Amino acid sequence: MTQLPPPPALGCGAAPVLKERGQREVFCGLTGIIWLHRKMQDAFFLVVGSRTCAHLLQSAAGVMIFAEPRFATAILEETDLAGMADAQDELDREVGRLLERRPDIRQLFLVGSCPSEVIKLDLGKAAERLTRVHAPHVRVLNYSGSGIETTFTEGEDACLASMVPVLPRNEARQLLLIGALPDVVEDQALGLLSQMGIDGIRTLPARRADDIPSIGPNTVYALTQPFLGETHAELTRRGARHIPAPLPFGEEGTTAWLSAIAREFGVDRDTFDAVTEAPRARARKAVARATETLQGKRIFFFPDSQLEIPLARFLTRECGMDAVEVGTPYIHRDIVGPDLDLLPAGPTISEGQDVDRQLDRARTARADLTVCGLGLANPLEAEGLTTKWAIELVFTPVHFYEQAGDLAELFARPIRRKEKLKLKEVAE
Ligand code: SF4
């Protein structure tokens, strides 16, 4: 199989982890609805929440206006919150009205929020009851996007995990790709794997309810996102087997990810090389442009998206950056272990957050680029630090070979901008 760059003499696999358990500064899991509703074309997301939740969704969705929106908020009023009204009856009526008006909906997700959790509204029971009423045309599932329980990428994890227990059973040998990628990016991966002779690949989530995959003991699966810990656990519970690999970010990550799948399916080295050679070269060339800016620059990650470890691996090994701290909300070693092994020893690896203490460390480090949430970015910029919003990394297509250059550019752009501003200041 294609020769990959060797792992560092000392990686971060056995590095000590700084565990933080303080206040967090991240969006809640409702945010995932923004990319999930684009992916699942006949699904509807009904948030059972407050006006705050509705505002979050509207502002996160930005200027997108749909003739037929595929998410909404069932607002819990004060009477619901005070236990004075039967919120379950109201929910049944709301869902009935929605499904009558919208026969195009095939999957309905009831999404829990902080308020629905505080009043202990049982959305699991509601989903079972509503599935009985509306099956077989609509399947109703539920998951929590509450900020009490989830960080912003965990919304996708919770959504996919809710689908796994009800997937039909299948005994056939098959490959599943797990994670909601933009269709065009997903098609690139399917195309490469199909050129290697691996066919019949299914994806979760599927684009439409009719394409939902089945699962069984001969199913193997590859994760395309590092934040799918609960989905990974559910898939394992159903007897499927994970193919561990670095995540497909950058040329090296994509090659290592494809190569793990190719090994599983017995693809020979010549075929693998013939399929990957040209896109690898394109990816290297595209990354090299951004590397001119990124080489030798220091980067500090606040814990946000759970993409931090694979991205730090990409930025240090392929773009020549130095990682000072790599903070991530959770470390699922089953998933990010291969990336940790490749990440050269040196940075502080931190899990969880204690925002004040981490801000102190970021201010002391004064890295060339600080990756953080929207709430921290403006104050840090005001203190002269250059920042990158973590959420952009989830909204932008960044996986696989053809996006490797764009991924590197996301980090190079703010640094270049800062350098230009400095030059302008000097000139004035
Ligand atoms: S789920 Fe919680 S954190 Fe998220 S918008 Fe609603 S109230 Fe706010």
Image (cartoon, rainbow, N blue to C red):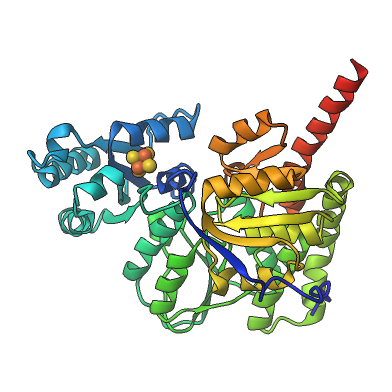
Q: Residue at x 82, y 78 (%)?
A: 270
Give above or below for 273 relative to 150: below
In-image side of 175 versus 289 (left or right)? left
Asked where in the image residue 196 lies, by quadrant, the reply is: bottom right
Q: Which residue is drawn at 81% across and 76% down?
A: 9
Q: Residue at x 25, y 50 (%)?
A: 117
Picture quarter with the N terminus: bottom right
In-image side of 169 versus 400 (left or right)? left
Judged from the image, the quadrant occupied by ligand 1 is top left
In-image side of 325 versus 133 (left or right)? right
Asked where in the image residue 326 lies, by quadrant, the reply is: bottom right
Residue 378, image x and y in percent?
Answer: 61, 31
Query: Can the viewer see residue 6 in this picture?
Result: yes
Give above or below for 12 relative to 52: below
Q: Residue at x 67, y 32 (%)?
A: 381
Give above or below for 57 relative to 394: above
Residue 413, image x and y in percent?
Answer: 77, 37
Residue 265 vs residue 365, the one in the foreground? 365
Residue 33 vs residue 27, the one in the foreground? 27
Query: Can the viewer see residue 104 in this picture?
Result: no
Point out the residue furthest to the right here.
427
Residue 397 vs residue 379, the one in the foreground? 379
Residue 5, image x and y in percent?
Answer: 83, 72
Asked where in the image residue 351 lies, by quadrant, the reply is: bottom right
Residue 303, image x and y in percent?
Answer: 57, 52
Picture quarter with the C terminus: top right
Total count of labels: 0
